[in-house]
Image: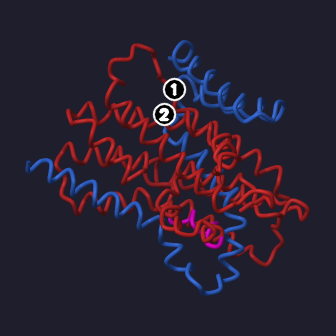
């Protein structure tokens, strides 16, 4: 019983803290006030920069100095990009890239 | 009924469906590994709704970490989310009563899907973004429960399936690349990430990288980094 109580509190704390990080910009600039021009500007130019950061975030634990030099990740990312540039179909790009990656990490660069 | 809008939201979120089912399963498996009931995976997915956040939470619960540590580490890990809302301060208001839910459900993946969803004149944008957010959340809950309940009995080798998330970001990256005239923000993002990755290491790089990115973009504010004008119709 005491353990359950601990888990419930832990989940509650994590939930509140996660929500808090997501709510910060809305608490600062939301509401009825006019959104400052700088924030509008940032909201406009940030997405492409953040998506780029997120791609790096996804491969942050890849060791490019290891024997495989992160070959699985590099090949799979390039294949995904190439598929998307040629076919322009989101599902084909993501599905194809993922299958290629799974094949590479399971059979080639184990 | 909003059948058409739900269909459109579903189409937009299919990549997240695959990503979340597998990523969620991975988180569910992790919980099953610590010997806890799958019901906790359900509640975590429902109330916390953060991939890396839940992994951290599970590992902290496993060592009975004090609540203060859970709070501190969660804030630190999820600090990148503080930057996402900047692009949706006005747009989320269209969700009406669901405004708080939109803030709650702003994950990496929902953020990127919303960024790649144009505001159109024919579709009720407030409803569309709400359904996108709700569908993503449902996928996540299903994934987390699925992983915790049956994941450990599956014999198929899922290793590498979490690449679906990386692939999703790559696809959105290309879409954004096409619709922006200036690529300076992208270069700044990549450059600051790589520098910070080398300086701070893989566990701590993202917050400094984002701070440097935002600062650099502020410095460049006077220079034109705008969209191609003809496509400047609401992409965030």
| Numbered disc 1: secondary structure | loop
| Magenta extent | B82-90
Indicate left or right for B171 with B64 as reference.
right
Q: If you read the primary sequence from the N terminus, does the residue marked by circle 1 or circle 2 appear first?
A: 2
Instruction: Name, please, the residue furthest toward the right.
Output: B230
Residue hosting label 2? B21
Q: How is the image coloured?
A: by chain
Rendering coords of residue B3 (x, y %): 65, 46
Residue drawn at x 21%, y 60% as measured from the top left:
B67
Which chain does the numbered disc 2 sit on?
B
Residue B50 belongs to the span the image colors magenta: no
The colour applied to the residues of chain A in this rendering is blue
Rendering coords of residue A5 (x, y %): 14, 53
| Numbered disc 2: secondary structure | helix
Residue drawn at x 38%, y 31% as measured from the top left:
B146
Residue B43's disc is none
The colour applied to the residues of chain B in this rendering is red
Residue drawn at x 21%, y 36% as measured from the top left:
B36
Question: Around disc 2, counting alpha carbons within 10 Å, would you say few (fewer than 14), some (14 to 19), or many (20 or more)?
Answer: many
Residue drawn at x 52%, y 80% as measured from the top left:
A28
Residue hosting label 1? B160
Report how far apart the C-alphas of labels 1 and 2 lie in the structure.
13 Å
Tell which of A89 and B69 is nearer to you: A89
Tell which of B90 and B200 is nearer to you: B90
- Above or below — where is A43 with respect to B35? below
Indicate left or right for B149 with B94 as reference.
left
Rendering coords of residue B126 (x, y %): 64, 62
Rendering coords of residue B138 (x, y %): 48, 44
Which chain does the numbered disc 1 sit on?
B
Question: Around disc 1, counting alpha carbons within 10 Å, would you say few (fewer than 14), some (14 to 19), or many (20 or more)?
Answer: some
Residue B83 belongs to the span the image colors magenta: yes
Tell which of B91 and B116 is nearer to you: B91
């Amino acid at each position: 019983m005491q353990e359950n109580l601990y888990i419930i509190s832990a989940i509650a704390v994590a939930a509140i803290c996660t929500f808090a990080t997501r709510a910060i910009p809305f608490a600062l600039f939301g509401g009825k006030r006019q959104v400052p021009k700088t924030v509008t500007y940032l909201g406009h130019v940030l997405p492409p920069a953040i998506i780029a950061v997120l791609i790096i975030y996804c491969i942050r634990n890849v060791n490019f100095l290891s024997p495989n030099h992160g070959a699985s990740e590099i090949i799979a990312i390039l294949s995904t990009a190439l598929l998307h540039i040629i076919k322009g179909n989101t599902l084909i790009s993501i599905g194809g890239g993922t299958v290629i990656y799974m094949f590479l990490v399971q059979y080639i660069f184990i | 009924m909003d059948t058409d809008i739900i269909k459109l939201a579903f189409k937009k979120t299919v990549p997240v469906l695959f990503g979340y089912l597998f990523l969620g399963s991975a988180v569910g498996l992790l919980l099953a590994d610590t010997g806890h009931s799958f019901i906790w995976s359900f509640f975590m997915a429902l109330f916390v709704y953060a991939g890396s956040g839940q992994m951290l939470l599970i590992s902290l619960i496993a060592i009975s970490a004090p609540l203060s540590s859970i709070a501190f580490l969660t804030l630190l890990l999820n600090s990148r989310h503080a930057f996402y809302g900047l692009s949706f301060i006005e747009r989320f208001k269209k969700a009406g009563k669901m405004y708080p839910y939109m803030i709650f459900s702003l994950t990496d993946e929902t953020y990127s899907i919303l960024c790649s969803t144009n505001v159109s004149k024919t579709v009720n944008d407030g409803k569309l973004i709400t359904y996108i957010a709700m569908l993503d959340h449902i996928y996540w809950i299903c994934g987390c429960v699925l992983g915790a309940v049956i994941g450990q009995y599956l014999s198929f080798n899922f290793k590498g399936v979490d690449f679906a998330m990386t692939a999703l970001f790559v696809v959105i990256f290309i879409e954004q690349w096409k619709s922006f005239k200036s690529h300076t923000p992208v270069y700044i993002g990549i450059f600051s990430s790589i520098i910070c990755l080398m300086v701070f290491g893989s566990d701590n790089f993202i917050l400094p990288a984002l701070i440097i990115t935002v600062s650099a973009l502020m410095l460049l504010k006077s220079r034109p980094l705008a969209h191609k004008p003809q496509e400047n119709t609401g992409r965030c």
